[in-house]
Image: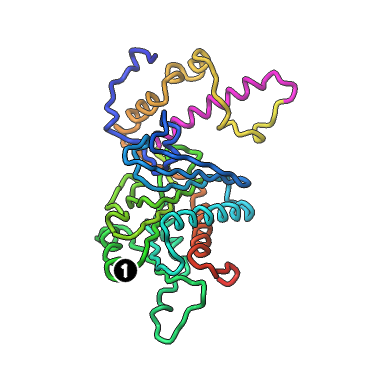
Amino acid sequence: MVGESMKHEIDLKKYTIRTDLIVDLLGEIEDNEGVEVKKEKEGQVETTYVEITKEENALHKKVGHYSTISFEDVTDSKNRKEVEEAFVKAFRTILDQEKIQEKQTALVVGLGNMDSTPDALGPKVAKQVLVTRYLFEIDGVTPEEGYRNVASFIPGVMANTGYESGDMIQSLIQTFHPDFLIVIDALASSAISRVHRTIQITDTGIYPGSGVGNKRKELSKELLGIPVISVGVPTVIDAIVLVSDTIQYLFQHFSYHKDFYHKTKLAPITSIDTQSYEDHLSYEEKEKLLGQVGHLSEEELQELIFEVLTPIGYHMVVTPKEVDFVIEKLSVILANGLNRVLHSSFDNSRF
């Protein structure tokens, strides 16, 4: 129970913890009404397949398929290869579920702002996609077998162009009639552990700009008339979540040391992920560490942080300092994966 001096009556509708990831919500549901979940793991990579089967479902998400690829690291070639293989497999599964054939034409759209690194993932991927549409338009030219008709488009952001990305994409579709749309964008997560370590693929569409709380016109099959497959990576996190997660990790860290302090051989802190260690500190121990803040519930803690940060203008979204390096690596993984899926004859070594 929170002390009377700290008790707040807060309207939760005033703010939301931004997340675009369906896996962030799985732990919050008490039943799986309308939600089917399957997981598989290969090496360091775990893929979670979620199918929403009913309009009224426990996650309040659109009916469709969601594939989430979770991994620890993309800083070496072995890990990147594992992530790319998982991405290719999950994306092919989505294409099969949408009954998209090898000869059908694709438009790949890279959403985001190239001048803002956390938001540059979409444009960077789109620039590396193998575009072949012009070959299909040239008289007397027959593209090699195994290459699909693919076009690419980077709409930029409304502040630079004056146009809604959705309007430009809709115009392209009405003019050139691609059979399906692939959209790549940066997302937001409600967990530190998922930033730069998760790829989500879904056939339910996307809201451009939702990752930074600037939700624009929806891109979906219902609106555009063709299948829309979105690919996203969380590159930012709400500052409120960052602070509350840090406090929780602190409790887990102390729980680990408490449990192993009397052991004859304490495992080095680098050899165990204390962020996933179970927190079982007592009420009194948490109070000794952080006073009354120590025993606030997760919801109460986020409410308190929101009230502290917002009045002084610090309701922010943040990104890790190595974002430049990771975005480069992830853009290559996604582009190579898309090229392999879209073009059955694609060979990385030739490009």
The image shows residue 202 at horizontal and vertical percentages of 41, 50
Dot 1 amino acid type: His
In this orientation, which residue lies closer to the viewer: 202 or 164? 202
Q: Which residue lies furthest to the right in this view?
A: 264
In this orientation, which residue lies closer to the viewer: 274 or 100? 100
Query: Looking at the rendering, in which quadrant would you find the N terminus?
Result: top left
Q: According to the image, label 1 marks what residue?
A: 177
Instruction: Say which residue appears at 63% left-offset and 46% top-offset.
Output: 43
Residue 242 in the magenta stretch? The answer is yes
The image shows residue 150 at horizontal and vertical percentages of 42, 69
Instruction: Say which residue appears at 37% left-offset and 37% top-offset.
Output: 59
In this orientation, which residue lies closer to the viewer: 297 or 130? 130
Q: Name the image quarter holding residue 22.
A: top left
Can residue 217 be seen here? The reply is: yes
Vertical side of 91 occupied by 11: above or below: above
The image shows residue 210 at horizontal and vertical percentages of 34, 47
Q: Which colour scheme is used?
A: rainbow
Helix, strand or loop at mark 1: loop
Vertical side of 180 occupied by 36: above or below: above
Q: In this view, does 314 lie to the left or right of 268?
A: left
Give the total number of marks visible in the rendering: 1
Q: Is the magenta stretch mostly helix, strand or loop?
A: helix
Q: Is residue 119 left or right of residue 44?
A: left
Query: Looking at the rendering, in which quadrant would you find the C terminus?
Result: bottom right
Can residue 114 be seen here? The reply is: no
Residue 151 in the magenta stretch? The answer is no
Instruction: Say which residue appears at 48% left-offset and 46% top-offset.
Output: 68
Q: Give the range drawn in magenta.
A: 239-265
